[in-house]
Amino acid sequence: MANLSPSPFQDFRVLVADDDRHMLDLVCRLLREIGVGTIEAASNGLSAIEKLEAGQFDLVISDWTMAPVNGLDLLEHLRDDSRWADLPFVMLTGKGDLDCVNAAKSAGVSGFLLKPFRLADLKRQLERSLLSSTDRER
């Protein structure tokens, strides 16, 4: 029997940035499966900034390794702008080394998704980033 209860994520808008088209499509498909209401895709960090300028989002999920603006640069740009300083940001990366983790933490990352990840990992990041911030922002 299908689950007819509404998704706790149906009212959220998520921006996904990744220059790997297959990974971008996968993350967007998984977000739809989880029940995220609005999903926008950006092919790199620069495109993500343009989409942020044009719309309102509740969360950014970004790959680390992109050009011309990588995920860490995107995160730092958002944290330096008062409009997005508190916007939850999940870094999608294959970089698990301590220096990378510390750099992202210093820049204000909200969470990490280490490739390869599972649907449950993505859902857990959404719960931590969106549902825990609901009380503060809404």
Image (cartoon, rainbow, N blue to C red):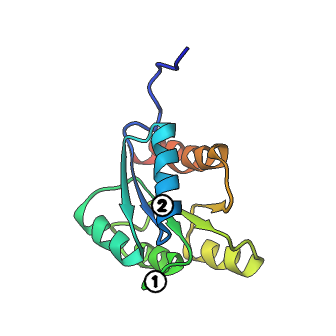
Q: In the image, 95: left or right of 34?
A: right
Q: Tag 1, which secondary structure? A: loop
Image x and y of residue 75, in percent: 48, 73
**In percent of the image, x 55 and y 14: which residue is there?**
1
> Pointer 1: what residue?
67
> Pointer 2: what residue?
24
Task: Give the quarter of the image for residue 16.
Answer: bottom left
**In percent of the image, x 57 and y 66: which residue is there?**
91
Q: Amino acid at mark 2?
A: Leu
Disc 1 to disc 2, how far (Cα)? 15 Å
Do the residues bearing badges 1 and 2 touch, measured as CB atoms within 8 Å? no
Q: In the image, 108: left or right of 116?
A: left
130 w.r.t. 44: above or below: above
Q: Residues within 10 Å of mark 1 (few under 14, many from 20)?
A: few
Image x and y of residue 103, in percent: 64, 79
Of all residues, the one furthest to the left in this rendering is 54
